[in-house]
Image (cartoon, rainbow, N blue to C red):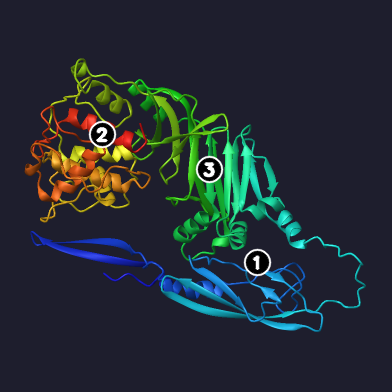
Amino acid sequence: MHRPNYSASDSAVTLEAEVDANQTTYKVQYNLTILAANMTDKEAVARDIKLLEIGYTAGDDEKHVRNRLSLPTAGRNGSSITWTSSRAEWVNTADGSVSRPSTGDQTVTLTAKVTKGLESDNRQFHLIVLKNNTNVEQPKEPIKEPTKEPEQLQSDFYIDFITQNNQKERIKLTQSQVKSGLIEIDKKTEKGYFEVSGETAYKLLRLNPSFAFQITTAGGIMKLPVSELISSANNQFVGKNSEKINFSIYVGETEASVPLLNDLKSRSAKLLSGPIQFKIIMSIGDEAGIAIAQLGSKVERRIVVPNTATDTIVAVWNEQLKGLEYVPVRYENIGRQVYALLPVSSDGLYLNIVNQKTFADMKRHWAKKEAEKLASMLIFEGKGEGIFDPNAHLTRAETAALLVRALGNPVPAHTVEFPDIDGQWYEVAVTSATEAGFMNGYEDGSFRPNDFVSREELAVILSRVIEYDSSTDSNAPENHSIQFNDSKDVSKWATEAVQKINSNVIMIGDNEDNFRPHHTTTRAEMAIILSRLLSKLGYM
């Protein structure tokens, strides 16, 4: 299969299959859409060269330059732009400032270099900087004229707030906000959503590539770089003018749906606060809006936490599976309020709950505290009503599911093609774990989900998890030999991982100082190990 070029857009293809059986021919048609190839760096540079424009102060143009210029530093398709001036004494490309000559109009050539990856190209703009009017009598003491550009920014740039009663409140951006590159909007006492036009987003991005909105409501905070909006628009509205897009931004409390409330009831869980909704809808004109599927890692979301007791957790509602899932968070104090920083990059409904679980077969067990805590966090599941089964051996499928739940890995866009996981309850979890690099398949193309996990295999998996979580800063020694009585029994491929996990006190030896590398891990052991891992990562 060959994907069409980006410029050719998606292509419709019809496949027809004929099957002859019992002297009868059966025909089946399949209508497919072959997605166009991703835009190459060369295409991105060419498009951004064509779209590139200089921003002029009102009344100015390329043949009549009197005031500061706006020189974009980033293209709409991910390129970077650098500028040079043939006459830096008249036009300074560092800030776009203009110094008008006193002896006559001057021609200045600005050269923009547009680069993405290894591709680059140049475009030139020939400007005429007008001389100063020497007939105007200069005052004895210089008087600074007010710059006209900030006034224009203050009137032209705005965000609309739509209240619950569908009333529109226009929030004009101040000069200081535009200069700072951070628009802080506080709506703690009102409910509603925000609207930003694609045109405004593009203009702000041209002024400052790191421009961001920070929206604070009664339920949470969202810090949203404008570049993330533009990137999502370009990815999901391929072939359309992104400046015509309107963004509807939802941050704050919303009503809990009946399925969500039923899920809480079935777990005997208590809702402390929420749900808090984070959602961005993109639309063009009267067309139906679509939600942004995935935002980048630069987006920050925080929800208010009314209770930070040890049995409180943050959960997210999975609309597809109609169930609650654990969210690993780190807590912060902002002013006098406690917030949970959400690590995930996708939007959704978040809530604070208490979900206490106990198991009849763990009453006097050495792993009782950890097993019941992880079950209350929606990570571990029992085996039947009130049963944990601590001595059961841990399978590869269970290991994948536990790690994905504990770390809040996003649902993968596509499933990995392991024939032995197709259609099974662990298919999505195994795919997430392999995409994240925690676990791998075998050379024969299988995953072997029901194989048990040895302790040295688990050490290797957990060492990859620590590397995956970029926020982890291990101070453990890197080059320290394994000090166990059975160190010689550890396989060579697992030696480094066992040392790393032991140094971080995630997996340790038994009372006789043996690691037992080839012993199968039990569910009780995994409860202890997973608790230590989450504590190391800052989630417990």
Left or right relative to 135: residue 488: left
Residue under pointer 3: 222
* Image quarter of the C terminus: top left
What type is the residue that disc 3 sits on? Answer: Met
Left or right relative to 76: residue 524: left
Instruction: Reply above or below: 49 against 431.
Output: below
- In whole angstroms, how far apart are the C-alphas of marks 2 and 3? 30 Å
Q: Position of residue 374 (x, y in %)?
A: 29, 28
Q: Position of residue 516 (x, y in %)?
A: 10, 36
**Residue in the foreground of this view, choosing between 182 and 253:** 182
- Residue lying at 75% horizontally and 72% vertically, measured from the top left: 60
Front label number (2 vs 3): 2
**Residue in the foreground of this view, choosing between 517 and 164:** 517
- Residue lying at 28% horizontally and 33% vertically, measured from the top left: 532
Left or right relative to 470: residue 106: right
* Image quarter of the N terminus: bottom left
Of mark 1 and mark 2, the one earlier in the sequence is: 1
Residue under pointer 1: 95
Q: Position of residue 108 (x, y in %)?
A: 68, 81
Q: Secondary structure at mark 3?
A: strand
Residue under pointer 2: 530
